[in-house]
Amino acid sequence: VSVLGLSLVVASGGHSSSRCAGLSLSRPLLLRSTGSRRADLLIKVKFGESIEDLQTCRLLIKQYIPTGLFVDPYELSSLRERNITEAVMVSENFNIEAPNYLSKESEVLIYARQDSQCIDCFQAFLPVHYRYHRPHSKDGETFIVLNNPDLLMYCDQEFPILKCWAQSEVTAPCALNSKDNCQWNNMKYKSVYKNANLQVPVGLTIHASLVCSVTLFITVLCSTLILVAVFKYGHFSL
């Protein structure tokens, strides 16, 4: 299992630091499951200091998925039914079978939940999968850059401290299953570390002839065994 980390902090603009508390976003765990092409992205947002009535606020994370990765909409549907995450695909005409060089960047909206163990924290969960990449001539790996997400916040009441973070307004659904739209505040921040780089194993071009030969041999062998079994044990009637 590999672990990558990333932390972000909101820029306070022209306000003094004594009036503007920090807002940090971290992706502390990006876990590559052993033996699979999936990674679990855990996102945590923490306010610099406690804010009264934070329970009236909602946090929406807009994550951009690069071409080298994809999110399975059917998996998201299953996770929503089990109340594990509140994420939904934004992109239309999405093909999870397309390889890296034929795919497009996609977007996912994740409605973060308040952390029960941290009064001024939100957290979210998103599983991502690696797409097929072209084989390389030398290195058996490639790197995928996962850019920082957009943080959108909506509160039922106004907080003066939100002026420190708000950059612009974005229209988005008020909740996961809501048909109503709300005006979310796009939170301005700067990254403490660079965007996350995810290492992905790829094939080597020198193995192409070997892989094709073995695949062809197994296909012919299995087809022959099936035909032999059909003619030996099958019952034919005219």
Image (tube, rainbow, N blue to C red):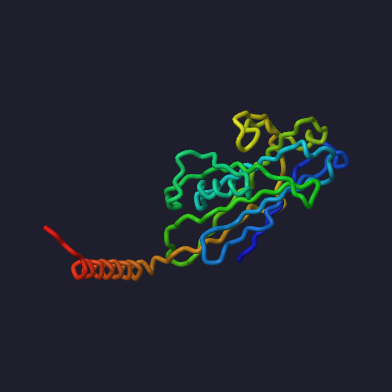
Q: In this picture, is 90 found above or below 192?
A: above
237 is higher (above) or lower (below) than 180: below
Residue placed most toward the observer, 18 or 125: 125
* Picture residue at 84% right of the left edge, 44% below the top: 50
Residue drawn where x is 72% and y is 43% of the image = 189
Q: Residue 58: image x %, image y %?
A: 71, 38
Quarter of the image for the C terminus: give it. bottom left
- Residue nearer the viewer, 179 or 145: 179
Q: Residue furthest right?
A: 18
Number of labels in the image equals: 0
Residue at figure coordinates x 70%, y 45% from the top left: 113
Quadrant (top left, top right, bottom left, bottom right) of the N terminus: bottom right
- Percent coordinates x, y for residue 153 in the rendering: 71, 37
Foreground residue among 99 and 112: 112
Seen in the image, is 120 located left or right of residue 153?
A: right
Q: Quadrant of residue 10?
A: top right
Seen as rendered, the residue at the extreme left is 238
80 left or right of 201 in image: right
Residue 101: percent from the left, percent from the top?
43, 51
Of the pair 53 and 71, the residue shown nearer to us:
53
